[in-house]
Amino acid sequence: MKFFVDTAEVDEIRALNETGMLDGVTTNPSLIAKSGRDFKEAVAEICEVVDGPVSAEVAATDYETMSKEAKVLAKIADNIAVKVPLTVDGLKVCRELRAQGTMVNVTLCFSANQALLAAKAGASFISPFIGRLDDINLEGSDLIADIRTIYDNFDFDTEILAASIRSVNHVSQAALIGADVATVPSSVLWKLYEHPLTDKGLAAFVKDWKSTGQSIL
Ligand code: E4P
């Protein structure tokens, strides 16, 4: 499973990129607002840091304006994935961009039927939002599982990008179900490394090694 980081903070992206574990980045209008950065400038900088897909979302909701915005975003860099909402107009823009060879991430997916429509529109990525479904007492991971089954039934090559991930358990659930990608806040990505038994075991090994008085170098 690929890891994308869900942020517009370039410093966070650089630090994660240095681990060699980062496969891409997703942004959205809320994350851009939080960063306080100029949208196109921030996205261009992120595209220079990361080799993989960088999602940049259109702001309009009507076909004409979304289509124009998408063309501007697609020109920022070769690794841009234009993010469009899962609406009739959004999927029209998706189809158009895919015909031009631009990657498209269809966002705000909350049902299996919506994911089916996105795949039929040729989406590169579908973003089902796990956390926001859990927030309203539904099981977000069930949606990922349903989409996995549907895409496998018809050999769709749209990648399932598990989004709205809030915890390390969401990451392992997405991986167990077979999501192709998880987009994860940087705080959660760093937590994936952690386990108290790793810390405890390492402390014991360091102590016992010291007691041998030996040196490897
Ligand atoms: C990513 O593409 C989504 O915009 C993001 O994961 C949404 O996460 P949230 O529900 O925590 O805002």
Image (cartoon, rainbow, N blue to C red):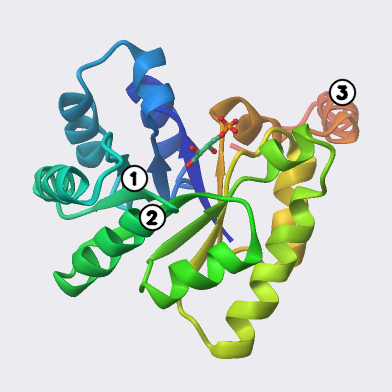
Quarter of the rendered structure image containing ligand 1: top right
Q: In this view, does 55 lie to the left or right of 155?
A: left
Furthest-top residue in this view: 36
Is label 2 in a helix, a strand or a loop? Answer: strand
Residue 201 is situated, as x and y percent measured from the top left of the image, at: 89, 34
Q: Mark 1 points at which residue?
A: 55
Q: Residue at x 21, y 46 (%)?
A: 66
Residue 10's quadrant in the figure?
Answer: top left
Q: How far apart are marks 1 and 3 (CA)?
A: 46 Å
**For this view, does 43 lie left or right of residue 87?**
left
Q: Which amino acid does label 2 sit on?
A: Asn
Badge 2 residue CB within 8 Å of ligand 1: yes
Name the residue that disc number 2 marks: 105
- For marks 3 and 2, give the one nearer the viewer: 2
Residue 89 image position (x, y, % from top left): 31, 55
Residue 43 in the image: above or below residue 138 = above
Q: Relative to 114, does residue 60 appear above or below in the rendering? A: above
